[in-house]
């Protein structure tokens, strides 16, 4: 009985963590080339509504995932054009992308509010998208550490000048990373609406995109550390649901803050234990120094 309960909690934790894991992976890869994208929340939202709409029309959750990725890429292109083409402040551009995604998802999602779809059938008790997310985590870690292009991305993140001197085109690496981040955050949004909640509601991401931006620091910009960080969020979210189901005499709104409060506490502890900028790409650090 106890073993079955533990397995059920583990499956629920992984399922809850998958949307954040994908968005967190996307932002990690984006920041590794010296670009920060605060628009992840908006990209998740358009991915969620795009994926949900595709499944409503086709009945195929795989097409929903593809539609979510396409929507995330489309919105991240706006960030790329603003930052790389017009040299707009990255933080301002990210806020613009977030608000654009929020508005578009609210507008396009009106016909689907409260609708229901069917996601993927579980594989070994876990959604296939969770397995995909774990596989992507490993693949991206290998990409950064073992492939020529991945090493070039790291050089760009460390120094745009050195990258240019080595014959690398920094703008190209940054464009690739921004679009990859858009694809993964859009996929995370689609997983949230199609495979996790199996419904659409306005602003359903509930800050996951902003949480992802902060948790990149906790994960030290390392894809393999992204997985345990996301799982902690998933565990806390499942704990909230269990506490609510148990009838705990605490405001449901206060309980809903638990996962985000835990993320904040984790960030504070990470800062206390080690330098918060440990592992930060130098190109990214320069953005924050320019603001101070």
Image: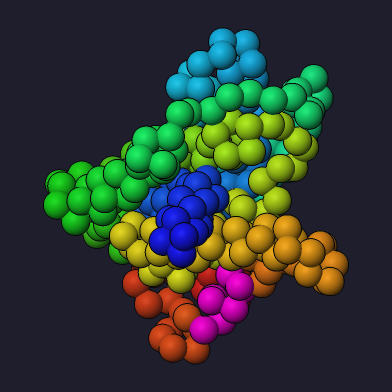
Q: Give the residues in magenta.
A: 262-269
Q: Position of residue 176 (x, y in %)?
A: 37, 38
Q: How is the image coloured?
A: rainbow
Which residue sits furthest front? 1
Look at the magenta stretch and give its main secondary structure.
Answer: helix
Asked if residue 5 lies left or right of residue 96, the reply is: left
Closest to the observer: 207 or 61? Answer: 61
For image coordinates 35% across by 64% down, the residue present is 225
Which residue sits furthest top? 58
Closest to the observer: 280 or 161? Answer: 280
For image coordinates 78% across by 29% down, the residue present is 114
Quarter of the image that includes the C terminus = bottom right
Which residue sits furthest bottom? 272
**Residue 152 visible in rendering:** no
Seen in the picture, residue 60 relative to 144 is either above or below; the reply is: above
Closest to the observer: 216 or 156? Answer: 216
Q: Position of residue 240 (x, y in %)?
A: 67, 63
For image coordinates 51% across by 16% down, the residue present is 60
Seen in the picture, residue 134 relative to 202 is either above or below; the reply is: below
Q: Quadrant of residue 210?
A: bottom right
Q: Is residue 182 magenta?
A: no
Q: Position of residue 135 (x, y in %)?
A: 29, 44
Asked if residue 255 lies left or right of residue 129, the reply is: right
């Amino acid at each position: 009985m106890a073993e079955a309960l533990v397995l059920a909690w583990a499956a629920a934790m992984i399922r809850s963590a998958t949307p954040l894991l994908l968005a967190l992976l996307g932002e990690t890869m984006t920041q590794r080339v010296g670009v920060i994208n605060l628009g992840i929340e908006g990209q998740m939202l358009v991915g969620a509504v795009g994926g949900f709409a595709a499944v409503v029309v086709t009945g195929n959750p795989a097409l929903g995932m593809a539609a979510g990725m396409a929507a995330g890429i489309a919105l991240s292109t706006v960030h790329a054009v603003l930052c790389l083409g017009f040299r707009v402040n990255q933080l301002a551009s990210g806020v613009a992308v977030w608000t654009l995604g929020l508005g578009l998802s609210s507008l396009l999602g009106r016909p689907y509010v409260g609708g229901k779809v069917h996601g993927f059938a579980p594989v070994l008790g876990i959604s296939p998208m969770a397995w995909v997310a774990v596989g992507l985590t490993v693949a991206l870690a290998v990409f950064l550490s073992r492939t020529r292009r991945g090493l070039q991305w790291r050089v760009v993140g460390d120094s745009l000048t050195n990258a240019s001197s080595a014959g690398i085109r920094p703008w190209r690496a940054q464009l690739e990373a921004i679009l990859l981040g858009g694809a993964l955050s859009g996929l995370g949004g689609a997983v949230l609406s199609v495979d996790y909640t199996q419904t659409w509601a306005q602003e359903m991401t509930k800050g996951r995109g902003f949480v992802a931006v902060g948790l990149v620091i906790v994960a030290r910009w390392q894809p393999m550390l992204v997985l345990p960080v996301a799982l902690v969020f998933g565990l806390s979210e499942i704990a909230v649901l269990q506490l609510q189901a148990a009838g705990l005499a605490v405001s449901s709104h206060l309980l809903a803050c638990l996962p985000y409060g835990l993320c904040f506490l984790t960030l504070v502890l990470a800062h206390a234990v080690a330098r918060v900028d440990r592992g930060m790409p130098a190109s990214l650090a320069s953005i924050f120094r320019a603001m101070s």
